[in-house]
């Protein structure tokens, strides 16, 4: 049996994913692989490195702290905080790449057309990104299909593989996975232009099935259906090719607790993190026996 745990996108709602993963780690429940799209990239990284207790709420509090500074920009905040973790002596990123470590996947969208690359990484990005959000609201994915290509970075890819996660690029990939097109700071990985994973892959379930995982747990940030992308026109079913998909969802809309995609209260941030821990423990109480072969 092999188990993968997947985190979905959701902006600041990703603190719920962190709470669930913290509860799993505290209970000694680990997977063979982890994956996280967009806001779940760093929580997945922390889980793969068994560092949830270290990262925990601190990462999210730092994001909110910087976001509230005068003149702050979300892209600058996410870039700065990601770089802080990159250089933190406490965060042993190299442990992610030691023999026997869980596999880590981070999806991110490569901008495959040269003109679109200039637009997404330059001064036109803000206007283009906001125009694209309007198209997405109409379920129009044409620009996405014409210009973006999903790359799944993998910590256990062969050394010659173009999309291998390494100690040197993992934080660049994590930032790129969160970088919406309308953000100011561009995202580059090894000289190539990238944008947020959620345009094509808000929850990398289907993408992991090709690797043969027999059970997949999804930590969702919404109470409703799971969608493959931000366009919300393709639902992820509960069983795919005979592989069951187990979902840990919030018990209520996280916005009602105090956390939305780009804003939150201090009380809400803590409450949603604690809610994630609670839902994680509840999930294990109900389903841990199913995954006992992984222990």
Image (cartoon, grey):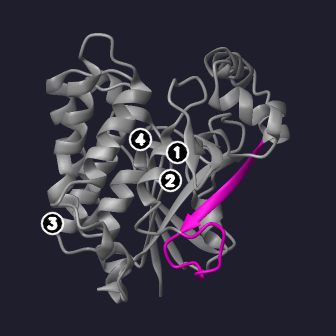
The span from disc 4 to disc 1 (Cα, nearest Å) is 20 Å
Question: Decide: marks 2, 3 in contact (CB < 8 A)?
Answer: no
Front residue of 23 and 66: 66
In what quadrant of the picture does the C terminus appear?
bottom left
Label 1 sits on residue = 176
Q: Is disc 4 surrounded by few (<14), some (14 to 19) or many (20+) residues within 10 Å?
A: many
Label 3 residue SS: helix
Q: Is residue 10 left or right of residue 121?
A: left
Q: Which of the two labelled residues, at mark 2 and mark 3, occupies the earlier sequence position?
A: 3
Residue that appears at 47% across and 60% down: 169
The span from disc 2 to disc 3 (Cα, nearest Å) is 27 Å
Label 3 sits on residue = 26
Label 4 residue SS: loop
> Which residue extends farthest top?
70
Look at the image and give the residue range highlighted in magenta. 148-164
Label 2 sits on residue = 173
Q: Is residue 198 above or below residue 50?
A: above
Q: Is disc 3 surrounded by few (<14), some (14 to 19) or many (20+) residues within 10 Å?
A: some
Q: Quadrant of residue 195?
A: top right
Label 1 residue SS: helix
- The answer to whether one can see residue 228 in this image is no
Front residue of 250 and 194: 194
């Amino acid at each position: 049996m092999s188990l993968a745990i997947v985190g979905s996108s959701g902006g600041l709602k990703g603190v719920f994913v962190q709470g669930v993963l913290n509860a799993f780690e505290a209970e000694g429940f680990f997977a063979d692989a982890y994956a996280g799209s967009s806001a779940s990239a760093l929580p997945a990284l922390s889980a793969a490195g068994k560092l949830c207790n270290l990262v925990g709420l601190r990462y999210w509090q730092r994001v909110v702290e910087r976001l509230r500074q005068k003149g702050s920009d979300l892209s600058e905040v996410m870039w700065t905080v990601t770089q802080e973790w990159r250089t933190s002596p406490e965060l042993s990123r190299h442990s992610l790449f030691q023999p026997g470590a869980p596999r880590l996947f981070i999806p991110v969208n490569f901008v495959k057309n040269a003109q679109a690359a200039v637009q997404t990484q330059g001064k036109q990005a803000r206007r283009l990104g906001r125009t694209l959000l309007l198209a997405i609201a109409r379920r129009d994915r044409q620009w996405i299909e014409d210009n973006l290509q999903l790359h799944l970075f993998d910590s256990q890819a062969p050394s010659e593989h173009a999309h291998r996660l390494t100690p040197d690029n993992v934080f660049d990939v994590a930032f790129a996975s969160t970088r919406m097109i309308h953000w100011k700071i561009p995202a580059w990985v090894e000289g190539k232009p990238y944008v947020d994973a959620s345009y094509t892959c808000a929850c990398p379930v289907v993408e992991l099935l090709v690797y043969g995982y027999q059970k997949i747990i999804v930590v969702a940030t919404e109470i409703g259906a799971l969608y493959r992308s931000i366009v919300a026109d393709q639902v992820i079913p509960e069983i795919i090719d005979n592989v069951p998909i187990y979902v840990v969802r919030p018990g209520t809309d996280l916005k009602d607790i105090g956390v939305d995609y780009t804003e939150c209260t201090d009380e809400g941030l803590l409450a949603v993190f604690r809610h994630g821990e609670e839902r994680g423990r509840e999930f294990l109480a109900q389903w841990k026996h199913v995954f006992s072969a992984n222990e």
